[in-house]
Image (cartoon, grey):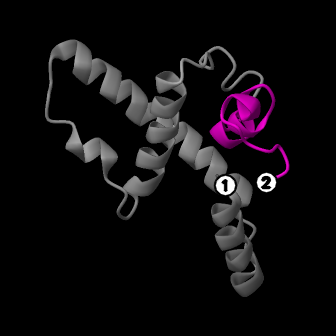
Amino acid sequence: MFAKRKSRLELVKERLGLDIIRYYSLVETVEGSARYIEYCVSKELGVTDCEFMYNLNGDSYYYASGFMLMLLLDRHGISYKDKLFTEYDTLEELITSSPYATAFGLSSHF
């Protein structure tokens, strides 16, 4: 699930000398959770035009990718909200750890 992402970020590290892997995961988690909260509030208020939340272009990428990972966790009925930011710093750490990795049929060795 995260193998292509890691490969792309390793290429950035190799070519530009920037190790942005941790930064990427942290921004995705913080911005994605912000988008998730916006989505939940919008639903409560009856707002139906939420297509902007799924935009993967430009700076919105981090918001959308983190948001969609949270929706995926919700859709699978996986309880994670009390563990994110306490036991796990990023969504990627949470998803790739057991038992979450097992729930998604993922190897913990990406």
Amino acid at pointer 2: Phe
Q: Does residue 104 appear left or right of residue 28 in this picture?
A: right
From this view, report whether residue 26 is shown above or below residue 6.
above
Determine the secondary structure under disc 2.
loop
Q: Is residue 94 magenta?
A: yes
Residue corresponding to mark 1:
2
Q: Front-most of 100 and 91?
A: 100
Q: Quadrant of residue 80?
A: top right
Q: Which mark is residue 110?
A: 2
> Residue 79, relative to residue 5: is it above or below?
above
Q: Looking at the image, which is closer to me, 30 or 4?
A: 4
Q: Secondary structure at mark 1?
A: loop
**Residue at the image position 85 percent from the left and 50 percent from the top:** 109
Q: Position of residue 81 (x, y in %)?
A: 59, 18
Looking at the image, is 17 positioned above or below residue 26? below
Q: Please report the bounds of the magenta region as a residue range.
A: 89-110
How far across and how far down the image is residue 47, in percent? Answer: 15, 24
Callout 1: few (<14), some (14-19), or many (20+) C-alpha neighbours within 10 Å? Answer: few
In this rendering, position of residue 75 left or right of residue 86: left
Estimate the x, y position of residue 51 in percent, counting from the top left. Answer: 22, 43
Q: Quadrant of the C terminus?
A: bottom right
Displayed quadrant of residue 92: top right
Rate crowding at label 2 as few (under 14), some (14 to 19) or many (20 or more) other CA atoms within 10 Å. few
Instruction: Look at 58% across and 40% down and name the residue there.
Output: 29
The amino acid sitting under disc 1 is: Phe
Residue 66 lies left or right of residue 91; in this view the side is left
Image x and y of residue 82, in percent: 65, 14
Identity of the residue drawn at 48% across and 51% down: 62
* For marks 2 and 1 on the same chain, the one whose residue lies earlier in the sequence: 1
